[in-house]
Amino acid sequence: MSATTLFAPHALLPEGWARDVLLQWDAAGVLQQVQPGVAAPAGVAQAAGPVIPGLPNLHSHAFQRGFAGLTEQRSSPGQGGEADSFWSWRTLMYRFAGSLTPERLEAIATWLYLEMLEAGYTSVCEFHYVHHQADGQPYADDATLARCLLRAAERTGMGMTLLPVLYQSGGFGGQAPHGGQRRFLRSTDNLLRLLHTLQGELNRGLHGRGTRLGLAPHSLRAVPPDSLREAVAGLTALDPAAPIHIHIAEQTREVDDCLAWSARRPVEWLLEHAPVDRRWCLVHATHMTEAEYRAAAASGAVAGLCPSTEANLGDGLFDLPLWRDAGGAWGVGSDSHACVNAAEELMLLEYGQRLQRHERNVLASARQPGVATAMTLQAVAGGAQACARPVAGLAPGQRADWVALDPQHLALAGLPAPDMLSAHVFGSHRSSAVAEVRVGGVPRVQAGRHALHDEAARAFVQARRELLEST
Ligand code: NGQ
Ligand code: ZN
């Protein structure tokens, strides 16, 4: 039996569902052959359930998993007082960020990436902005916290695009940052030095197979125009195809502040002042005019949608049908990790559209009437673009990142394969139907569990306890 071959009676290929597919990958974990309609070869491992591509998670702040579920009580007086909001959540979030240590971050990220793998994600884009010690002093090794994230990915087997964040100001127009932000601050040169150091290490084969580096200007609030220009130019000189992710237009207050500062809305300003193209991922982009939707989609940038976080933080709803109509690429991220489940994220995205439009099956496509199938294929394509890694699904040249669903799961048992995916997304998320997960061909989850599950869970609970005690 070859360890680099799989026979899948049902597999979701970029063009749709196929029968009797032979998948073959090389020692580096790259698919060499994906052939439908073949007879099951003797002695080749056979997938028990339908095989779908692993979903890239295009937006993560790993440390935020450490306090998921703990910001859900009203902090303001309520009646007549100011309502809790994104901004009051952010104040709480900064407190937790202030109590991070390298050990705690690594334990939280290790558990998070393991949870992601068990839930059907096989790549993550880590938007990494807590850089320094609690008092704002750099660590002796300036890449200390970045290394914690890289080690967490390598240990769990998660495919990684690390996006060190540029953060310099507390608001539009170069406002001074405040105390809660001091762990995030770097000069542009300093950030570019970090990227050079890490890229040198990646070139020497450190930090896990296929790890990719990019840049994340945090937001137009946090990065003044000159710094944005210099950082993008510096990154491009280092790697012309490296990904660039930015939070944009998530809250209406950001739009209002941007208008007051520049007489432009955030997306409008970005498109006028930055070389936005396929390298870019516009995270959230919730509040756009129709003209912004069309111009941003035409730029080739990916929309980074984070349905569970956007609901949790009260951001608003992205108009995905309009974006798709304009030819826009999109993918999903779990962002603050209120939810860590690829299928549930897709479900929430579709449900938001249903609630808004009073329609059903909104995100199906002309080619794929099945909503779960259409969304999976699009989120894999857009997610891969945002990762800037070859993770665009089950096709030659892409990494062998796939998920086999459990055909015995009660929500799935006895159904045709495409309906199994539909039941996985819309009918089973409270108990996952993910049976097996491979990343670069390497088995990471078997019978629904990662090999490090118990050990990583214990370390996470300990780290969370310490985090709460010192916050
Ligand atoms: C973050 N998170 O950086 O973690 C942000 C909040 C901000 C989200 N936008 C902070 N969901 O945007 O200033
Ligand atoms: Zn974010």
Image (cartoon, helix red, strand yellow):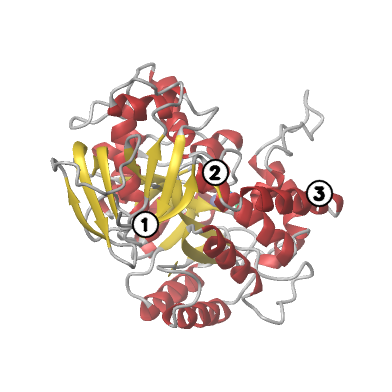
**Which residue lies under the disc numbered 2?**
449
**Which residue lies under the disc numbered 1?**
441
Q: Nearer the viewer, residue 469 or 296?
A: 469
Q: Nearer the viewer, residue 256 or 307?
A: 307
Judging from the image, what secondary structure is the residue with disc 1 in? loop
CA gap between label 3 and label 2 equals 24 Å
Left or right of residue 105: residue 426: left
Q: How many marks?
A: 3
Neighbours of disc 3 within 10 Å: few (<14), some (14-19), many (20+): some
Res 204 quadrant in image: bottom left
Q: Which tag is nearer the camera, tag 1 or tag 3?
A: 1
Left or right of residue 424: residue 311: right
CA gap between label 1 and label 3 equals 35 Å
Q: Amino acid at mark 2?
A: Arg
**68 above or below 459?**
above
Q: Which mark is residue 465?
A: 3
